[in-house]
Image (cartoon, grey):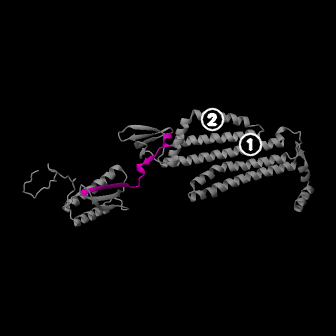
């Protein structure tokens, strides 16, 4: 302080009496108030510029470096609102400094109440601006995810949600501004409630379909081209829309399912299988020797192990038991491909290899056992070849 006073005394001796200049008033405001207000605005602009550079040059590149794409986009969307808030605060503080000694009967534009209300409205506007930018960033992020997942809902669903949230935010922000201006919002809220109820009742089916579309987007039970079964409808997903989903069935008919049905239906997605199962039994003749049965089981296991289209994670080949058809061989395995055509090709190759193995071992496939009875009720037993037997 002594240094400043000494500097002012030295300037006064040279003819520059800053104390007098600062004490002079113009439009009822002292010179020192103008100077201090100018310095505050200058400081706020400097803080605004510094914050913008820090965010753009240091913070945002760090998000990109470590793969935090959404966090970086959100921060990038807040750069301009944050810097605008610095400037707004600077202007508000400067105005408070300039009007600190204003008389009570001064014009309304210079009153403390008007300045405070203006600052509050400007702050609410900046916050709304920031929220709008965040909504746009999140909506763009989910549109990109939907496109990558081949769920074409980004236009009808995400844009609809984006606009609905924006309208809600604007309504809330508008109510806050009206309240800050000193008006009552109770009657306005009552009118909005009645109007919203009427709209909801009139559009309940549409809203139900929209919520069904939201389930398809958020849960991702299927995408375009998937083989699905929804209730008793089975086929390939051909179209996913805002109101309905279209399924192309096996007979090539097109079934349109309202999206609200999806909320209460069991959805089975066959295309989501990581592997495709094969399970069956086949019989060989009762006269097969035990050692040949063991060779057959071992041979089929080798066929499954050596086939490139068979998944090696889990498979079974066992002599399962006896039946009226013969000795039952049980086979259980998975194909690597879930595509129907490729799956059938693997099954065919495995089946042909099993047939060749059965023939090479001198075995035969079993046949249903039929017992024939004579007219006297006695079972017919055929005699050796060359003998005659009557029934």
Q: Look at 85% across and 45% down and name the residue there.
A: 99
Residue 239 circle label = none
Dot 2: what SS?
A: helix
Q: Look at 36% across and 51% down and name the residue there.
A: 339
Q: Residues within 10 Å of mark 2 (few under 14, many from 20)?
A: few
Task: Find residue 131 and report its horizontal and vertical position in percent.
Answer: 65, 46
Above or below, comparing residue 224 to residue 60 in the picture = above
Residue that carries the numbered disc 1 in the rendered image: 121
Residue that carries the numbered disc 2 in the rendered image: 197
Q: Look at 66% across and 56% down and name the residue there.
A: 54
Q: Residues within 10 Å of mark 1 (few under 14, many from 20)?
A: some
Query: Toward the viewer: 295 or 210?
Result: 295
Task: Find residue 51 and report its horizontal and vertical position in percent.
Answer: 69, 54
Q: Is residue 16 visible?
A: no
Q: Is residue 244 visible?
A: yes
What stretch of residues is rendered in magenta? 259-283
268 inside magenta stretch: yes
Task: Find residue 206 and report its horizontal and vertical position in percent.
Answer: 54, 36
Above or below, comparing residue 7 to residue 173 in the picture = below
Q: Look at 59% across and 34% down and name the residue there.
A: 201
Query: Toward the viewer: 285 or 295?
Result: 285
Locate the N terminus and report the quarter of the image it occupies. Answer: bottom right
Location of residue 107 (image quadrant): top right
């Amino acid at each position: 302080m002594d240094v400043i006073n000494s500097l002012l005394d030295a300037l006064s001796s040279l003819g520059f009496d800053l104390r007098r200049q600062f004490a002079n008033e113009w439009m009822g405001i002292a010179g020192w108030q103008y100077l201090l207000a100018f310095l505050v605005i200058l400081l706020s602009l400097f803080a605004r510029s510094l914050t913008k550079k820090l965010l753009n040059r240091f913070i945002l590149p760090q998000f990109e470096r470590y793969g935090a794409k959404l966090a970086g986009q959100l921060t990038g969307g807040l750069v301009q609102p944050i810097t605008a808030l610095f400037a707004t605060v600077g202007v508000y503080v400067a105005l408070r400094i300039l009007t600190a000694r204003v008389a009570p009967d001064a014009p309304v534009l210079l009153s403390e109440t008007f300045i405070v209300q203006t600052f509050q409205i400007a702050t609410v506007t900046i916050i709304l601006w920031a929220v709008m930018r965040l909504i746009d960033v999140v909506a763009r992020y989910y549109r990109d995810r939907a496109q990558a997942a081949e769920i074409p809902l980004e236009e009808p669903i995400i844009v609809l949600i984006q606009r609905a949230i924006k309208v809600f935010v604007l309504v809330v922000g508008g109510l806050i501004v009206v309240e800050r201006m000193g008006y009552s919002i109770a009657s306005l809220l009552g009118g909005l409630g009645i109007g919203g109820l009427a709209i909801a009742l009139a559009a309940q089916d549409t809203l139900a379909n929209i919520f069904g579309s939201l389930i398809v987007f958020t849960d991702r039970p299927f995408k375009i081209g998937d083989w699905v079964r929804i209730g008793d409808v089975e086929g390939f997903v051909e179209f996913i829309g805002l109101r309905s989903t279209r399924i192309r069935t096996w007979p090539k008919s097109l079934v349109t399912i309202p999206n609200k049905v999806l909320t209460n239906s069991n959805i089975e997605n066959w295309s989501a299988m990581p592997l495709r199962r094969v399970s069956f039994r086949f019989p060989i003749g009762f006269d097969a020797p035990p050692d040949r049965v063991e060779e057959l089981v071992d041979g089929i296991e080798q066929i499954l192990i050596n086939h490139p289209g068979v998944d090696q994670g889990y498979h079974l080949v066992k002599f399962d038991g006896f039946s009226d058809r013969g000795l039952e061989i049980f086979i259980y395995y998975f194909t690597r491909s879930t595509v129907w055509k490729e799956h059938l090709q693997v099954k065919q190759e495995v089946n042909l290899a099993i047939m060749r193995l059965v023939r090479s071992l001198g075995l035969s496939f079993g046949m249903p056992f039929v017992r024939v009875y004579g007219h006297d009720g006695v079972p017919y037993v055929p005699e050796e070849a060359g003998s005659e037997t009557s029934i």
